[in-house]
Every structure is written in structure tokens, then in C-alpha cells.
Amino acid sequence: MAKIPHRIFEIYESCDEAIRALTPKSWKAGAESTVADSWNFEHLTVSQATGVIHIQFAAAEDFGEETVSGLRKDFAQLADMLGIDNKVLVDFSGVELFNEAFIDALVVFSKQLRTKGSRIALCCLAPAARAFFFVPDDRS
């Protein structure tokens, strides 16, 4: 399994690897879901399969200031809708780059989930996007 070490997020190279890592061992096909099969937000598409909540970006090519503001709202709304102990996968397929404000929004979302005992992982990060998660902290 190609898990990439990071201090905040679990990062996987592929979606399949991340789903295998997140799928609860107790999950059984046909188990009752706490989440609708699919939700659509302004900037996110959310679905659930094998006990994992799968988040994809509706417009992966644009992460400008307005989009990040909308993503913050979508993330907050989703975090409020989710119960406790969820397994959440954020899929970056098609995303090439984003800015620091986007990472801040993702960190806030992660904290909201963790307060509910949920686990979050990221997958399919393009090399340039992945590098954004490993920028040295130079705010000494």
C-alpha cells in the first residue's frame, strides 16, 4: 500500500488503496448507511460505498478565492450532516493545483471530522498538488 506519511492527513496514491485502508473491517455489503447514497453540493459530490464517504470536487480545475469560499461552506455543511466515526475519503482526481486557502479549508474540515471521531484520508494527488502538503514551515 502506498501510504504517504504526513503529519495531519493520511495520503494514498490511489483511490482503491485509500478505500481498502478506510473500509471498516466490520462493514458488510448491504449494511445500513448513515448517509444518503449521493449528495450534491455547490462544489462537492459526495457518495458512500463500502462504508466510506467519498468526496470529489465538482470543478477540479478552478480553486480560486470564490471557489475556496464555497468549498468552506460545503465542507462545513457536510461536517454538520455527518454523524460520529465516519471514514471520509477526499479524492483529488483531476485536481492539478490549489492554493494555501484551500489547504486551510481542508484542515478545518479535518478538525471538524476528528472532533466526531471520524477518520479522513486523501487520494489521487497530482505531484504538484502533493508537494503543496509538504511545503516547509518557514514561520519561525
Image (cartoon, helix red, strand yellow):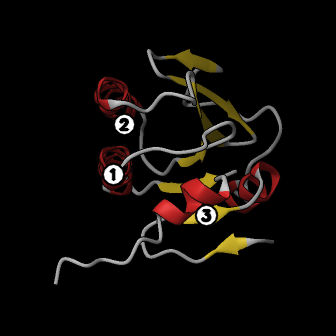
Of tags 1 and 2, which is closer to the observer? 1
Q: Point out the tag, 3 or 2, that comes first from the N-terminus.
A: 3
Q: Point out the tag, 3 or 1, that comes first from the N-terminus.
A: 3
Q: Looking at the image, which residue is at 75% across and 41% down? A: 50
Q: Give the labeled residue for mark 3.
A: 11
Q: Looking at the image, which residue is at 37% across and 30% down? A: 64
Q: Give the labeled residue for mark 1.
A: 100
- Measure the C-alpha gap from mark 3 to mark 2: 20 Å
- Measure the C-alpha gap from mark 1 to mark 2: 21 Å
Q: Are marks 3 and 2 in contact (CB under 8 Å)?
A: no
Find residue 81 and report its horizontal and vertical position in percent: 38, 28
Q: Is residue 50 visible?
A: yes
Identify the disc placed on residue 79.
2
**Label 1: element kind:** helix
Q: Tell me the kind of residue under disc 2.
A: Ala
Q: Looking at the image, which residue is at 66% across and 52% down? A: 126
**Label 2: element kind:** helix
Q: How many marks?
A: 3
